[in-house]
Image (spheres, grey):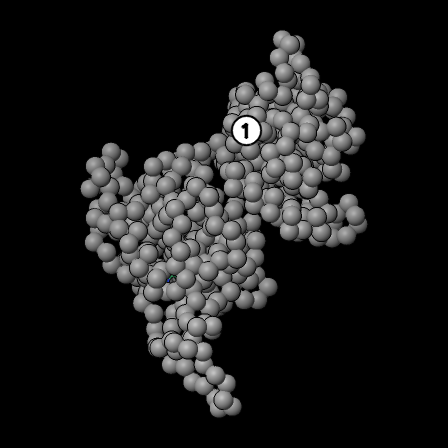
Amino acid sequence: MTDSRGTLAGRRIVVGVAGSIAAYKAVALVRLLGERGAVVDVAMTPSATQFVGPLTFESLTHRPVVDDVLELDADQQIAHIELAEAADAVVIAPATANLLAVLAAGLVQDAVSAVACASRAPVIVAPAMDAGMWTHPATQRNAETLRGYGYRIVEPEVGSLASGLTGVGRLAEPPTIVDAVERLFARAGDLDGVRVVVSAGGTREPIDPVRFIGNRSSGKMGVAIAEAARDRGASVTLVAGVMSVTQPRGVEVVDATTASTMREAVLRHAPGADILVMAAAVSDFAPQRASGSKIKRDGSSLAITLVPNPDIIAEVGEMPEEVRPFLIGFAAESDDLEANAAAKLRDKGLDLIVGNVVGGPFDAIGSDENKVTVFGAEGALTDWPMLPKRQVAERLWDLIADRWRAARPAEPSEGQARRSRRR
Ligand code: CTP
């Protein structure tokens, strides 16, 4: 961003602080938000005030801190309701495991949960806790529930924790949280009305009623892409292969567990869509014939003939220009990322391809993070670090939306817009 100071000028932001040792980082967060022009109010849970005194925040913001749900402001209004209604965004940092549970359950127990519950503004939650607490299924389920409410979660980072142990659970650094806030305002609604199809997860090609050929894809990247598009206002169809993550809310989900059903679903929904992102790991081969009954072990070896599956995205690439969406593929490569991605872009008729490394120490499969490079016809377009998949998704949409718009005439008729999408 060229002028980051003014990016939040005049925005009303409520920072909610919960009782974690990381509460001290909220001081830096409040300062950074203020430097970018935001009007910041702070709400605190009672235990947060044990870690950082309200006076610290009041000195920075020159505004009263709300730390009591029964508090009235100078006009005798209920302070947390006033804040909730005025807020353009609510940023909860740090959020404890307990607060995530409270928010997920819709409980109002303190000024922070009261503001979050009462506000219609977007909510960003940055958790901080012990690694065991963060990875506990209950906490993960609560985080998932909050994502379902449309809350953005700024993932905790790996590092040394208050316990003295090292693990995931450390509050994201204040600049990372500010980045999430800036992105919220920069992109809100920038895909309003855009029709997006995303495929995610892996396929399973049956060998017999109980066995299959599959792959390790979790669907996390594709789901993050679908959720990010949804949050920017797109109408999203998710063609969901086999995934280890919960299906997102607020998008149309079409289940497709084999390459052949995925092909049918994509070919049904892609024509007329504006953008197709093919993040699914489609099996390249399927058994020539799936046995109708379970294959028995009889001591002899078993040969299965595999036949190639059709290349789905390449078929979409060959669609007539009037119906062909802007096409983004993925290239999962263990070697020669750039050369292989460029060849796939060309051979499959894509507009962009997202290259990621699989296998080895940077293996993207199943991970919550990914390091990708996006390629266009002119070569590599990005140099992004390893990022949480949701952040990768946000950056991808920044790029895709720009490129897709640039490929359309200024005031297009529907027909012109479609014709122009193919470069
Ligand atoms: N793809 C597809 N249909 C297939 C195989 C892949 O639509 N039958 C899509 C993937 O969703 C991805 C892109 O093509 O967007 C590249 O997938 P990838 O597995 O990296 O490449 P392949 O073409 O399968 O080549 P290879 O496995 O030999 O690297």
Q: In this view, does 46 lie to the left or right of 217?
A: right
- The residue sitting at 57% across, 66% down in the picture is 360
Local SS, label 1: strand
| Residue in view at x 24 percent, y 59 percent | 318
**Residue 104 place in picture, x, y as percent:** 60, 38
Q: Position of residue 333 (x, y in %)?
A: 46, 65
Choose between 13 and 176: the one closer to the eye.
Answer: 13
- Which picture quadrant has residue 172? top right
Amino acid type, residue under disc 1 in the picture: Ala
Q: Farthest front residue?
A: 293
Q: In this view, does 52 lie to the left or right of 194?
A: right
Q: Residues within 10 Å of mark 1 (few under 14, many from 20)?
A: many
Q: Residue at x 26, y 51 (%)?
A: 271
Instruction: List the single residue furthest toward the top.
Output: 75
Name the quadrant containing residue 89.
Answer: top right
Q: Where is residue 226 in the image (x, y as percent from the top left)?
A: 43, 47
> Vertical placement of 415 versus 63: above or below?
below
Mark count: 1
Q: Name the residue under label 1.
A: 89
Q: Residue 148 or 42: which is nearer the viewer?
A: 148
Can see residue 65? no
